[in-house]
Amino acid sequence: MTGTVCLQGGREFSAACGPMDAALVARAGGPVVVSALAGAPGVDYRTASANGVRHFAALGGKGVIAAPDVREDPEGAVAALRSARLLVLPGGSPARLLDALQSTAAGQAVADLLAADGVVMGASAGAMVLCSWTVLPDRGVQVVPGLGLVPDVVVVPHWSGERGDWLRAIDVAVPVHATILGLPEESGVVVRAGQLRAVGRFATHVIREGRDLQVGQRLQPAGMPSGGPAQT
């Protein structure tokens, strides 16, 4: 079976994110693991991970822990990731997060969790790298392949109707059939069984179609298999 992905636009762990995150906790039904690999090693990683632990523990998450940083403790980190039923990837630098996931066994652990019908939540950078392509704004607004766990989708987080430089780069690099999502903060989409469902405070903007997906509405992107998030 395939799992569930929640792509969020940012300002994660706020009170307004509580209802959509509580639904993820309920769906996962097991341990919650936070890994803030989009942050720099050290204080940045520990602070962001601790914020996530407090948030999900307050929502009734089971066994909520912060994973060790895979860049410092590869074996301990991967063991923690493999214990998760809900894995949380907060925001920060998409380049840093993508590098950490692709250069270690952490990326495979994410894919394996989804293959085992687990739940993965990514916010901002975390949402970006789970998709087929991601923008790397700290590398000259490059568009590069992401993990591809949410196929044929690109995320533009913190959406407010702007990001013209990102959209120009995406239009050059990403096939026309791909779905480009503008995700406002405290909002996002749940991806399951080949469909996207808008959740959170605000509508998701389907950029190439020029329309909003209101909270609760569903969309089935043309390029996404009906089985849900991709497995690798």
Image (spheres, helix red, strand yellow):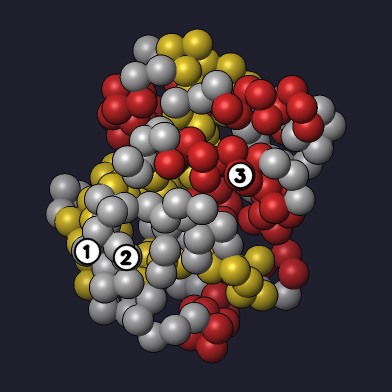
Residues under numbered marks 2 and 1 in contact, where contact means CB atoms less than 8 Å apart: yes
Mark 2, residue position: 224
Which quadrant holds residue 69?
A: top right
Which quadrant holds residue 1?
A: top left
Mark 3, residue position: 108
Please state which amino acid type lies under the numbered disc 1.
Answer: Gln
* Residue 117 placement, left or right of 174: left
Please state which amino acid type lies under the numbered disc 3.
Answer: Gln
> Counting residues from the N terminus, which is met first, the one under dot 2 or under dot 3?
3
Q: Measuring from the top left, give residue 57's x and y in whole percent.
A: 46, 14
* Residue 229 placement, left or right of 32: left
Please state which amino acid type lies under the numbered disc 2.
Answer: Met
Marks 1 and 3, how far apart at CA? 26 Å
Point out which mark residue 220 bears.
1
Nearest to the observer: residue 52 or residue 178 = 178
Above/below status of 139 relative to 108: below
At horizontal 46% and vertical 72% (from top left) the residue drawn is 162
At horizontal 74% and vertical 69% (from top left) the residue drawn is 139
> Counting residues from the N terminus, which is met first, the one under dot 1 or under dot 3?
3
Q: Residues within 10 Å of mark 2 (few under 14, many from 20)?
A: many
